[in-house]
Amino acid sequence: MTLGFLVYLFPSVVAFRRDSRHRWTVLDINIVAGATFLGWILALYLATRRRRPVASTG
């Protein structure tokens, strides 16, 4: 049971450990739609997305 719960929340754990900008969105998606495969994949995608570099103005 505990292993299943950790797998279910894996995208959220990844998002918070990586200090993702979308970590709260990932958690919301993971809780609400994580039981569906598509919701879990979307949460994982957002959790592992790379940050865009800040464009320099100059």
Image: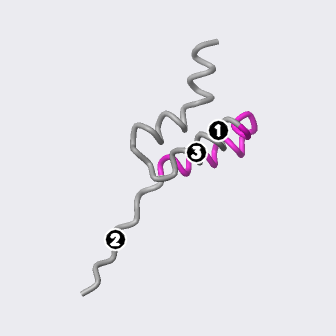
Which residue is painted at 59% across and 48% down in the image? 25
Q: Which mark is residue 8?
A: none
Q: Where residue 10 sits in the image (x, y, percent)? A: 54, 32
Toward the viewer: 21 or 13?
21
Locate residue 57, reporting x and y percent: 29, 84
Q: Is residue 33 left or right of residue 28?
A: right
Residue interval drawn in magenta:
32-48
**Looking at the image, is mark 2 or mark 3 earlier in the sequence?**
3
Q: Residues within 10 Å of mark 2 (few under 14, many from 20)?
A: few
The residue where tag 2 is placed is: 54
As drawn, is 35 to the left or to the right of 49?
right
Q: Residue furthest front?
A: 24
As shown in the figure, which amino acid type bears the numbered disc 1? Answer: Asn
Residue at the left extreme, as displayed: 58
Q: Position of residue 54 (x, y in %)?
A: 34, 71
Which mark is first along the chain, 1 or 2?
A: 1
Question: From the viewer's perspective, is residue 8 above or below residue 22?
Answer: above
Residue position for label 1:
30
Q: Within 10 angstroms of label 1, few (less than 14), some, or many (20 or more) residues?
A: many
Which numbered disc covers residue 26? Answer: 3
Q: Residue at x 63, y 49 (%)?
A: 42
